[in-house]
Image: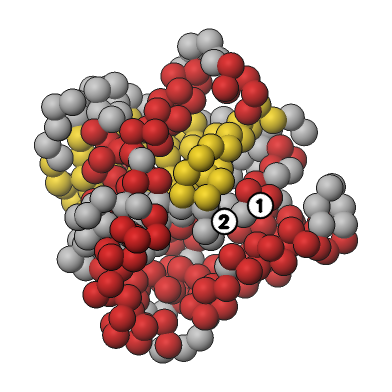
């Protein structure tokens, strides 16, 4: 595979400059990638190389990460509504007339659910592939159903997810998460990804890692409690593929069960992979994305896609 060089450009968002990485020919169908926490858009490079032959691939540094502007350290700067405004600016810049395919991971996926369920964006997304990042409102309903023993969900599955999400409570504490990033995690993050996730050496490096980790903590502080305690009924009107890596250390497979209630066109696909398989197995991840998008664009569904189709 011949590597395609990325180009960089800036877009004016509602609160400051957002930096984009682009691969391939702009006349091809647009595919937008949204990274998670504590990453930046550089973490999509390997995945983009496996998709660029058929798509114009765009990834952007979300606010506070990489080369995008750093907003003030306060909750209101990181709400889902602010993140939606950033995405709309990117969408208007790279594909103002044609709908795009959206692919997101981790916190990128959490915010991308906001995009996929936003009525004002209906018709602007051709498809949405989500991995390791649920809609927070859906999680709020999922937890309520688990506590009440409804819809096949149990209290045990709720506690199982809470064990995986222990760090979220820590992120709500003042100062401590930032001190941990500045003192330990910032220097050792790349090594941790290599040891825990099998990420190749160098793939997990970012020069702004410590700052990105500190800034991104505000994503949790601004959004988790409001969504979980007062969940909205968010319906996705675009075809959605939920990829479920069975070795995910942070997101339980049970968390994506029962989504057809909120997603009329849903494919849920389990596979052998870890949380950062976008870095450790980019070719596998890209193949799952391409298989789904190709079907949405008109190709017959493969047997694997047919098996993953979910119905309410």
Name the quadrant of the C terminus: top right
Q: Residue at x 31, y 81 (%)?
A: 184
Position of residue 210 relative to residue 36, above or below, is below
Occupied quadrant, residue 193: bottom left
* Residue 282 spot, x, y in % from top left: 33, 39
Of residues 100 and 48, the one nearer the viewer is 48
**Which of these two is toward me, 219 or 36?**
36
User: Which labelled disc corresponds to residue 251?
Assistant: 2
Q: Nearer the viewer, residue 184 or 169?
A: 184
Q: x%, y% of residue 23?
A: 20, 35
Disc number at residue 293? none
Residue placed most toward the observer, 261 or 310: 310
Location of the N terminus by quadrant is top left
**Residue with the mark numbered 1:** 255
Name the residue at 40% across, 46% down: 277
Residue found at x 22% / y 55%: 201
Identified at 51% across, 86% down, the residue is: 173
Residue 251 position, x and y percent, is: 57, 56
The reply to whether discs 1 and 2 touch (Cβ–Cβ < 8 Å) is: yes
Q: Is residue 167 above or below residue 27?
A: below
Compared with residue 311, is residue 153 higher up or lower down, i.e. above or below?
below
């Amino acid at each position: 595979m011949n590597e395609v060089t990325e180009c960089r450009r800036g877009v004016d968002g509602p609160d400051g400059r957002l930096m984009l990485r682009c691969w391939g020919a702009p006349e091809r169908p647009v595919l937008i990638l949204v990274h998670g926490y504590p990453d930046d858009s550089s973490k999509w490079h390997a995945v983009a190389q496996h998709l660029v032959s058929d798509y114009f691939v765009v990834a952007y540094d979300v606010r506070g990460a990489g080369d995008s502007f750093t907003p003030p350290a306060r909750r209101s700067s990181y709400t889902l509504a602010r993140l939606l405004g950033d995405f709309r600016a990117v969408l208007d810049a790279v594909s103002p007339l044609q709908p795009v395919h959206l692919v997101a991971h981790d916190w990128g996926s959490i915010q991308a659910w906001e995009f996929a369920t936003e009525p004002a964006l209906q018709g602007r997304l051709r498809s949405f592939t989500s991995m390791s990042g649920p809609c927070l409102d859906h999680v709020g309903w999922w937890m309520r159903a688990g506590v009440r023993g409804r819809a096949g969900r149990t209290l045990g599955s709720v506690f199982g997810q809470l064990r995986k999400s222990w760090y979220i409570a820590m992120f709500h504490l003042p100062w401590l998460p930032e001190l941990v990033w500045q003192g330990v995690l910032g220097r050792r993050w790349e090594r941790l990804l290599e040891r825990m996730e099998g990420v190749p050496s160098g793939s997990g490096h970012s020069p702004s890692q410590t700052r990105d980790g500190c800034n991104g903590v505000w994503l949790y502080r601004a959004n988790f409690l409001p969504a979980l305690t007062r969940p909205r009924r968010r319906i996705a009107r675009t075809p959605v593929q939920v990829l479920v890596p069975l070795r995910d250390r942070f997101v339980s497979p049970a968390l994506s069960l029962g989504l057809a209630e909120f997603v009329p066109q849903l494919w849920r696909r389990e596979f052998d992979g870890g949380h950062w398989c976008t870095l450790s197995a980019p070719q596998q991840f890209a193949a799952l994305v391409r298989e789904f998008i190709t079907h949405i664009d008109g190709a017959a569904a493969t047997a694997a896609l047919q098996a993953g189709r979910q119905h309410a």
